[in-house]
Image (cartoon, helix red, strand yellow):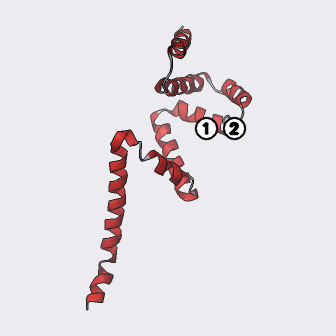
Amino acid sequence: MTADIWLILIPVYVLAALLLVFGIFALLGRIAGGKYLKPIVGSLMKLPLIGKGMRKMSQAALERQNPELASAVRKMERAGVAKDPQRAAQALSRLSRDERAAYLDATTEQADAAPMNRQMKRQMERAKKGRRR
């Protein structure tokens, strides 16, 4: 009789475990801006099925948010810019004007987020002023 109850409650246990895992992810995402969640997500990205799904979701969100940037990122990845700076320059020259502007804006935003010394900040300000003209 009690064995039947345990078998009936298996879906409840599975749902409770999933709820617990999602709760832990939500909690880790809120603490220190996701500082403790980033290593976990990085290791999950190495798994074939999960990593591919997360990349697709990220690409879809980027396409909804900024289609020019999504197109530029797709072209830059196809060119293999992470491995060779010369390829990066060639791929950047092949981008359309809107794609290039979106890509450069995104890369400067990333560079702005990184800690810099005074000289680097001045160089970035000069580059921004030159682009606005």
Rendered view: 103 above or below 131: below
What percent of the width, then of the height, locates residue 59?
52, 42
Q: Which is nearer the N-term, disc 1 or disc 2?
A: 1
Q: Mark 2 highlights which residue?
A: 80
Instruction: Answer with left or right where residue 77 lies relative to residue 50.
Output: right
- Report the Cα–Cα distance between label 1 and label 2: 10 Å
- Give the SS element for disc 1: helix
Rendered view: 132 above or below 103: above
The 10 Å Cα crowd at callout 2, few under 14, some 14 to 19, many 20 or more, is few
Front-most of 45 and 69?
45
Name the residue at 70% across, 25% down: 89
- Give the SS element for disc 2: loop
Q: Mark 1 highlights which residue?
A: 74
What percent of the width, then of the height, locates residue 74?
61, 38
* Number of on-image labels: 2
- Mark on residue 112? none
What percent of the width, then of the height, locates residue 93?
69, 24
Quarter of the image that includes the N terminus: bottom left
The 10 Å Cα crowd at callout 1, few under 14, some 14 to 19, many 20 or more, is few
> Could you say which quadrant of the image residue 68 lies in?
top right
Name the residue at 29% across, 87% down: 4
> Quick one: which residue is furthest to the bottom in this view?
1
Is residue 3 visible to the viewer in this orientation of the structure?
yes
Q: Amino acid at mark 2?
A: Gly
> Quick one: which residue is furthest to the front in this view?
117
Q: Amino acid at mark 1?
A: Arg
